[in-house]
């Protein structure tokens, strides 16, 4: 069993913001496969599907970004998932807009959603898929940047990144994460 978690904030106010890029990827994977996040439990919306005889969960925590672990941990406990069985998708200020990067483990890098998951799991050993949103302009705060929307020039890069991230998620459904990492970190 594997769980793909897209981080973001619930509600229309945040729908198209940089911080919700994890939700964008989950929604793309669901759309491609004709799935809907039709279950509400664990302070999130999710679906449980079967791909190549393996159970796959897509989860969008509804706890708001900074408390993401409060949704991820109960789901993992219920389904008896190990940290290595999850893939968390989130925005990254340290990557150029539209760049994707996969990692098997690491720190939180200042990302409060990842910090919450590490705190709740007591482990840094879970798979990550980071999508670059670049640093804020000098006159802008980090909060305003992550809660802002992509501009017209950035949207094509972000749409390509969401597409590539969804491809990586689908590849992980049937391949070891290391193989997916090697393929998509080029």
Image (cartoon, helix red, strand yellow):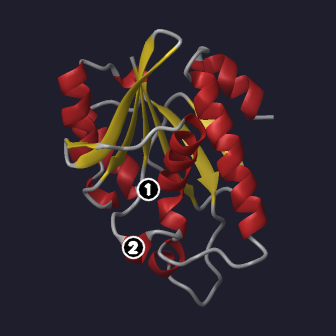
Q: Earlier in the sequence, mark 1 or mark 2?
A: 2
State the residue at coordinates (55%, 67%). 18
Outermost residue to the front = 34
Question: Callout 1: 10 Å neighbours few (<14), some, many (20+)?
Answer: some
**Image side of residue 19 versus residue 28, left or right:** left
Q: Is residue 96 visible?
A: no
Q: Is residue 136 visible?
A: yes
- Nearest to the observer: residue 122 or residue 161: 161
| Residue 159 found in image quarter | bottom right
Q: Quadrant of the C terminus?
A: top right
For label 2, the residue is: 12
Disc 1 or disc 2, which is closer to the eye? 2
Secondary structure state at the residue bearing disc 2: helix
Q: Circle 1 sits on which residue?
A: 111
Q: Quadrant of the N terminus?
A: top left
Circle 1 sits in a helix, a strand or a loop, which is it?
loop
Q: Residues within 10 Å of mark 2 (few under 14, many from 20)?
A: few
Q: Is residue 91 left or right of residue 179?
A: left
Residue at (25, 57) in percent of width and height: 63
Name the residue: 26% across, 55% down.
67
> Horizontal and vertical percent for residue 91?
54, 56
Provide residue 85's location: percent of width, then percent of height.
41, 21
- Residue 148, percent across and down? 53, 78
Identify the image quadrant of residue 29: top right
**Rendered residue at 37%/53% (across/down):** 113
Residue 21 pos. (x, y %)? 54, 57
Q: Is residue 146 above or below residue 161?
A: below
Residue located farthest toward the top when viewing the structure as drawn: 53
Q: Is residue 137 above or below residue 106?
A: below
Depth check: 73 or 37 in front? Answer: 37
User: So how many labels did they put on this image?
Assistant: 2
């Amino acid at each position: 069993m594997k769980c793909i978690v897209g981080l973001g904030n619930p509600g229309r106010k945040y729908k198209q913001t940089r911080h919700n890029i994890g939700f964008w990827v989950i929604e793309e994977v669901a759309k491609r496969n004709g799935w809907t996040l039709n279950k509400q439990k664990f302070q999130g919306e999710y679906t449980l599907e079967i791909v190549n005889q393996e159970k796959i969960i897509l989860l969008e925590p509804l706890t708001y970004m900074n408390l993401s672990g409060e949704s991820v941990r109960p789901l993992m406990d219920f389904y008896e998932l190990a940290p290595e069985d999850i893939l968390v998708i989130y925005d990254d200020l340290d990557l150029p807009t539209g760049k994707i990067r996969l990692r098997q483990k690491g720190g939180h890098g200042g990302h409060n959603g990842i910090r919450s998951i590490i705190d709740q799991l007591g482990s840094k050993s879970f798979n990550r898929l980071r999508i670059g949103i670049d640093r804020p302009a000098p006159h802008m705060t980090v909060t305003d940047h992550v809660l802002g929307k992509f501009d017209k020039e950035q949207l094509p890069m972000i749409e390509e990144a969401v597409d590539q991230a969804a491809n990586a998620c689908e590849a992980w459904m049937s391949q070891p994460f290391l193989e997916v990492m090697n393929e998509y970190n080029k």
